[in-house]
Image (tube, rainbow, N blue to C red):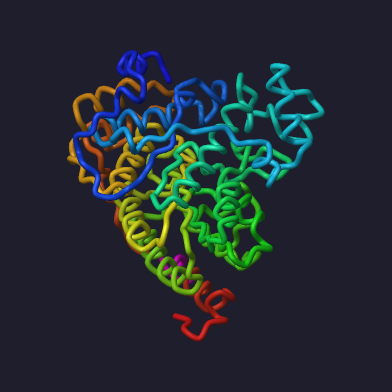
Amino acid sequence: MTGAVQAVVGRMNEREMLRPQIVATRRAVFVGAMRYRRASYGSNHPLAIPRVSLALDLINSYGAMAPEEYRQGRPASHRELFGFHTKDYIQAFERAQFRGGVEDSDRQRYQLGTLENPYFPGFFDTASLATGSSVLAAEAVLEGVTAFSPAGGMHHAAPGQARGFCYFNDPVLAIQRLRRASLRVLYWDMDAHHGDGVEAAFVEDPDTLTVSLHMDTDYAYPYQGGKLTDWPGLAVNLPLPKEVNDSEYALAFAVLWPRLLQHFDPDVVVLQAGTDILAPDPLSKFRVSNGLFWQVLRQIVAESPRLLVLGGGGYHPIALARCWTGLWAILTGRSLPAELPATGQTLLKAVEWELDDADAPDYGQQFLALQDTPRPGPVRTELRERLDFLLHHHPLFTNRSNTA
């Protein structure tokens, strides 16, 4: 968090800010921690921005969180981490934190301490906290509530390597917790980047289905897998063309979501709610508004038998905070005023970051209104053809008598 934002928040801790003013109509919990107010990822990194803390502060500016809706996150145990990650990787990670840096041999083998996955003080503790918090959120879902773990959603991490800004794969560990309760899991990944790490983890599990709508890996990270014809373990991948607009994304969701919900029949949905699909995001090639994001979310909330929501990508702090504030409102059944509260406007204006997009046509609106300007547009033949291909070739659809 920058000094300017700290001045706005002052000395109030998160518990002191939780003053309910807008009453929830659905049960949900937000899993957070004070640690997310610390600087992380060093400098000159896309994630060296306020994210969880900024979203929480904006939610609280609305008075939209009651004390019982907030849960303190916890670190992942070694036993939990070893459920997916290798022992030597965990040991190298802890060793680097203890020594205050990453050895060259460990950097090359485990991709720790690179520009992509940098060393910073406490980097093991921060990653472990985010991971344990997602497992805790999964346990809250088992209690019968919807849970949101915004620091989670790190879907690229491999068993023995950090990848794509992700040190531990918390979606995998959270899903493992749900699977230990014998629940059938549908993992739906909204992030602009292919959820490759989660997909690979459950190839052999017929009771976990991974679905990813993402930028085409021909031009975007991870630059492999995630093709239209890639369906390991029946995974569903829809690479979307550049400049996808609200109308196109809405069609893709409308075609796939109800069919997959019907064909797979899950006991629980795990949603990775990365905000890097939004138009302002510097790492996205999409042109989607947060209003469309929320439209998708409302249907997922209404139709999921149980729901765990994880964070994910999102490299524009203002767009992320506004989007996740609306997300929290939907999860809890709150209706928020369209105009941002005065304290919320001041909070967002105080954020300092290097990629501030002051020349964007709707730059000023992001400090005044919660919702973006809608971004409808023509639905390209290219997208229709990709959807048609999935419906007529993917085994999940073609092997059922009720194929659409």
Q: Is residue 218 visible?
A: no
Closer to the camera, 67 or 105? 67
Please indicate whether residue 66 sits to the left or right of residue 100 in the image: left
Q: Position of residue 369 (x, y in %)?
A: 22, 37
Queried whether the magenta region covers residue 93, the answer comes back as no
Toward the bottom, the furthest residue is 401
Considering only vertical position in the picture, is 192 above or below 133?
Answer: below
Please indicate whether residue 19 sits to the left or right of residue 175 in the image: left
Q: Say which residue appears at 75% left-offset and 29% top-offset.
A: 92
Considering only vertical position in the picture, is 18 above or below 220?
Answer: above
Q: Quadrant of residue 168?
A: top right
Toward the right, the furthest residue is 105
Considering only vertical position in the picture, is 91 above or below 217?
Answer: above
Q: Is residue 267 visible?
A: yes
Toward the front, the furthest residue is 143
Q: Position of residue 140 (x, y in %)?
A: 45, 46
Considering only vertical position in the picture, is 395 above or below 2?
Answer: below
Which segment did they paint magenta? 380-385
Q: Position of residue 211 (x, y in %)?
A: 52, 60
Q: Say which residue appears at 52% left-offset and 74% top-offset.
A: 389
Name the image quarter holding the N terminus: top left
